[in-house]
Image: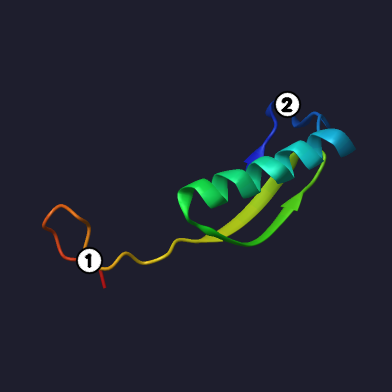
Amino acid sequence: MSRIVGGQMLLGVREKEVLRRLLWRVADFSGVEVLTYSIMSNHFHVLVQVPEKSGGLGCGAPAAL
């Protein structure tokens, strides 16, 4: 969750659409799966799933259980 400073209602229809598009671009770039999201006038919620990587962490350490 992220809130706008001071609780101001800064996200109008256009700003919400820009944030929604940016959310999907970042998800595509980072490889996470957006499970659900909600964008309100003064904050938003995003639930993502991070895919498991095969072969551990890539630094010689085993993957966490």
Q: Residue furthest right?
A: 13
Provide residue 36's location: percent of width, then percent of height.
Answer: 67, 62
What amino acid is labelled 1 in the image?
Ala
The residues bearing labels 1 and 2 have C-alpha atoms spaced at a distance of 40 Å
In terms of image quadrants, where is residue 40? top right
Can residue 12 be seen here?
no
Q: Residue at the location (80% across, 28% down)?
A: 8
Residue 52 marker: none
Q: Residue at the location (19% across, 55% down)?
A: 58
In the displayed structure, 61 sits above or below 4; it is below
Q: Residue at the location (45% across, 61% down)?
A: 50
Q: Nearer the viewer, residue 49 or 30?
A: 30
Q: Secondary structure at mark 1?
A: loop
Q: Nearer the viewer, residue 1 or 15?
A: 15
From the image, tell me which residue sits under label 2. Answer: 6
Q: Secondary structure at mark 2?
A: helix
49 sits to left or right of 5: left
Total number of numbered labels?
2
In the displayed structure, 3 sits above or below 36; it is above
What amino acid is labelled 2 in the image?
Gly
Provide residue 23's location: percent of width, then percent of height.
Answer: 64, 45
53 sits to left or right of 41: left
Between marks 1 and 2 in the image, the one whose residue lies nearer the viewer: 1
Mark 2 is surrounded, within 10 Å at the Cα level, by few (under 14), some (14 to 19) or many (20 or more) other residues, namely: few
In the displayed structure, 33 sits above or below 29; it is below
Q: Residue at the location (25% across, 67% down)?
A: 64
Residue 63 marker: 1
Provide residue 49's location: percent of width, then percent of height.
Answer: 50, 63
Can residue 35 be seen here?
yes
Q: Are marks 1 and 2 in contact (CB under 8 Å)?
A: no
The quadrant the C terminus occupies is: bottom left
